Amino acid sequence: MPTATMIYQATIKQLNELCQLDADAIELYARALEHIDDAPVREDLARFKADHERHVDELTRIVRELRGTPVARTRDLKGVVREVFTALRSVTGTRGALKAMRMNEKLTNRGYDAALDSDLPPNVYAVVVQHFADERRHLAAISDHLARLSSGDGGRPGPVTTEPPDDHDDRDDSAVVIQVIDDCPTARL
């Protein structure tokens, strides 16, 4: 049977992993926002970045309450790979940035989902559930923006865009990048 110390150590490790995902997301949103020219997308992404900042603060506070050491707010190798992917996709504009952030939110959602399968104390579990709800909301909104922008009219009445249709489905790209990131060690840089 696990002891309280073992549970707290496992909880601290799990929370630090989530904190790392959220810290990386803050940087990724900052990078993506540099390339967003659609006002509703810009507003949502700025709010999502603020959510990730709040998550880091709350998770850090809980780790300290459990007498643990919070993870340093620096990127690890996975964060660097995610940043490179985000930067490359974002230079193509709003849709590219959204596609990169959709992949990043999928990773963050997976992390929160996995955390809910671990043995968390009830008060910690409640916080993780709230954060996971935010992550799901982020992913849904990003997908909605992509659908709106891919509709050919930007989701608004007016002339049809002259931009060629996006015949390439990025789900395959995301799957490859997610696998590469999963295979990366978590070493600090």
Image (cartoon, rainbow, N blue to C red):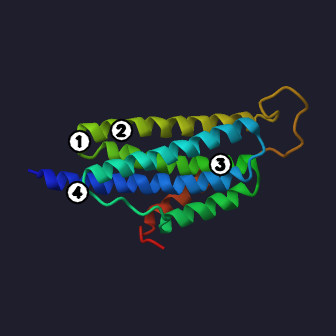
Q: CA distance from mark 2 to mark 4?
A: 17 Å
Label of residue 127 in the image: 2
Q: Are marks 4 and 3 in contact (CB under 8 Å)?
A: no
Q: Position of residue 6 (x, y in %)?
A: 16, 55
Asked if disc 3 and disc 2 are in contact, CB closer than 8 Å, the reply is no
Eye-nearest disc, 3 or 1 = 1
Give the left or right position of residue 142, taking residue 188 as reference. Answer: right
Gap between marks 3 and 1, in whole Å? 35 Å
The label shown at residue 99 is: 3
Tag shown at residue 9: 4
Residue at image coords 88%, 34% = 160
Which is more toward the observer, 148 or 50?
A: 50
Q: Residue at x 45, y 45 (%)?
A: 55
Q: Could you tell me which secondary element the residue under label 4 belongs to?
A: helix
Q: Amino acid at mark 1?
A: Pro
Check residue 121 in the rendering and tell me which mark sits there, or answer none.
Answer: 1
Q: Outermost residue toward the top?
A: 157
Residue drawn at point x = 30 percent, y = 53 percent: 64
Q: Is residue 158 above or below residue 42?
A: above
Marks 3 and 2, Cα distance to the nearest angstrom? 28 Å
What residue type is disc 4 on? Gln
Q: Position of residue 8 (x, y in %)?
A: 21, 52
Estimate how packed mark 4 is, as few (under 14), some (14 to 19) or many (20 or more) residues with alpha carbons within 10 Å.
some
Left/right of residue 153 with respect to residue 131 in the rendered view: right
Instruction: Point out the tag, 3 or 1, that comes first from the N-terminus.
Output: 3
- Secondary structure category for the residue under label 1: loop
Q: Earlier in the sequence, mark 4 or mark 1?
A: 4
- Give the class, few, some or many, for how many residues have Cα within 10 Å of label 2's Cα (few <14, many ≥20): some
Q: Position of residue 22 (x, y in %)?
A: 48, 51
